[in-house]
């Protein structure tokens, strides 16, 4: 359940809109929803799968998510996993025409979390200085 919270928080921090985790049971295959605007005229639905690093997400699972989007009449979805997507799963998502499903694997998820300071703390910053040659020029 914490993974779903993290995923929705990340998408919210990234600026996609106000997000919330759906109910924990009977969620119809959807773990969260991001309201892209204040009125909720356009929603992004989220699926979060916390799998072991060696356990891939296949086409069947992505296709099931696509069906859940159809059930909501949705055109946008984000599927995030801690593992990776098979080639068939990626090809399936790319070929969809009536809706857009973005697939984010564990490596990309980690990068996004670091870039947007979700689940990380800044412990050190380094400043690299260069010489300002104009400062030393004679008039």
Image (cartoon, grey):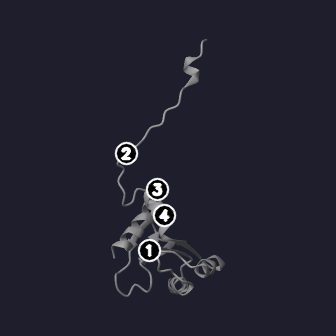
Which quarter shows the C terminus? top right
- Circles 3 and 2 in contact, beta carbons < 8 Å: no
Q: Position of residue 24 (x, y in %)?
A: 34, 82
Q: Which residue is mark 3?
A: 115
Please identify the residue farthest to the front as the structure is shown: 54
Q: Earlier in the sequence, mark 4 or mark 2?
A: 4
Residue 16 badge: 4
Q: Quadrant of residue 66?
A: bottom right
Pick whichever, 34 or 115, lies toward us: 115
Q: Earlier in the sequence, mark 3 or mark 4?
A: 4
CA distance for labels 4 and 1: 11 Å
- Circles 4 and 2 in contact, beta carbons < 8 Å: no
Q: Quadrant of residue 101?
A: bottom right
Q: Position of residue 50 (x, y in %)?
A: 41, 76
The answer to whether any part of residue 97 appears in the image is no
* Mark 3 nearby-residue class (10 Å; few <14, some 14–19, many ≥20): few
* Closer mark to the observer between disc 2 and disc 1: 2
Q: Residue at x 42, y 64 (%)?
A: 10
């Amino acid at each position: 359940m914490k993974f779903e919270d993290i995923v929705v928080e990340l998408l919210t921090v990234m600026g996609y809109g106000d997000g919330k985790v759906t109910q924990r049971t009977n969620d119809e295959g959807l773990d969260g929803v991001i309201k892209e605007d204040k009125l909720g005229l356009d929603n992004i639905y989220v699926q979060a799968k916390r799998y072991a690093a060696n356990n891939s997400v296949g086409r069947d699972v992505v296709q099931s998510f696509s069906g859940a989007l159809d059930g909501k009449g949705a055109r946008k979805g984000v599927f995030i996993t801690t593992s990776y997507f098979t080639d068939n799963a990626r090809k399936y998502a790319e070929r969809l025409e009536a809706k857009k499903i973005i697939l984010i694997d564990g490596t990309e998820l980690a990068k996004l979390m670091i870039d947007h300071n979700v689940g990380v703390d800044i412990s050190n910053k380094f400043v690299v200085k260069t010489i300002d040659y104009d400062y030393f020029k004679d008039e």
